[in-house]
Image (tube, rainbow, N blue to C red):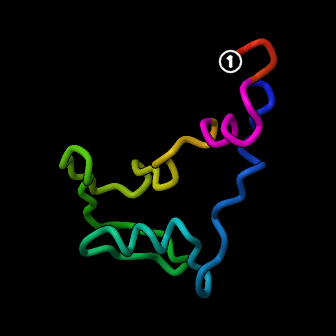
Amino acid sequence: MTSYSRAKFPHWITQSGTCNTREVVLKRDGTHVKANAACAAVSGRWKSPYDGATCTRASDLATEYSVGRSTIHRIIHGPPAGQS
């Protein structure tokens, strides 16, 4: 999709201090989450509500993809020219 640009979706706003939305969500949804001085999660456990899988690396998690941004883009702007 040529008109999609991730830059059009600035979603990691600061919530508190140096913590952005992603970091707040990881803390909220994980257990035993430890963060570094920059507020990034460096350890913890997260369990998927969809399949029960457990993850221990925050970098493996995509907190923003409940609905894909490209899907949202299509909803707002319609399909690319020539597609329906």
Reply above or below: 67 against 44. Answer: above
Reply above or below: 32 against 76. Answer: below
- 64 on left or right of 51: right
What is the quadrant of the C terminus in the image?
A: top right
Q: Magenta segment: does it hold 72?
A: yes
What is the quadrant of the N terminus in the image?
A: top right
Q: Work out whether residue 71 or residue 10 is closer to the camera in this orientation and state it.
A: 71
Residue extent of the magenta highlight? 71-79
Q: Where in the figure is residue 79, as x and y percent of width and height?
A: 72, 25
**Considering the numbered disc 1 on the image, is that residue within a helix, a strand or a loop?**
loop
Q: Residue at x 18, y 49 (%)?
A: 52
Question: Can you tell which quarter of the image residue 2 is in?
Answer: top right
Q: Residues within 10 Å of mark 1 (few under 14, many from 20)?
A: few
Reply above or below: 59 against 16. Answer: above
- 19 on left or right of 54: right
Q: Residue at x 77, y 37 (%)?
A: 77
Q: Where in the figure is residue 11, as x and y percent of width and height?
A: 65, 61
Which residue is farthest left? 52
Residue where numbered disc 1 is placed: 84
Q: Work out whether residue 74 or residue 39 is closer to the camera in this orientation and state it.
A: 74
Q: Main secondary structure of the magenta part?
A: helix
Q: Residue at x 61, y 81 (%)?
A: 18
Q: Amino acid at mark 1?
A: Ser
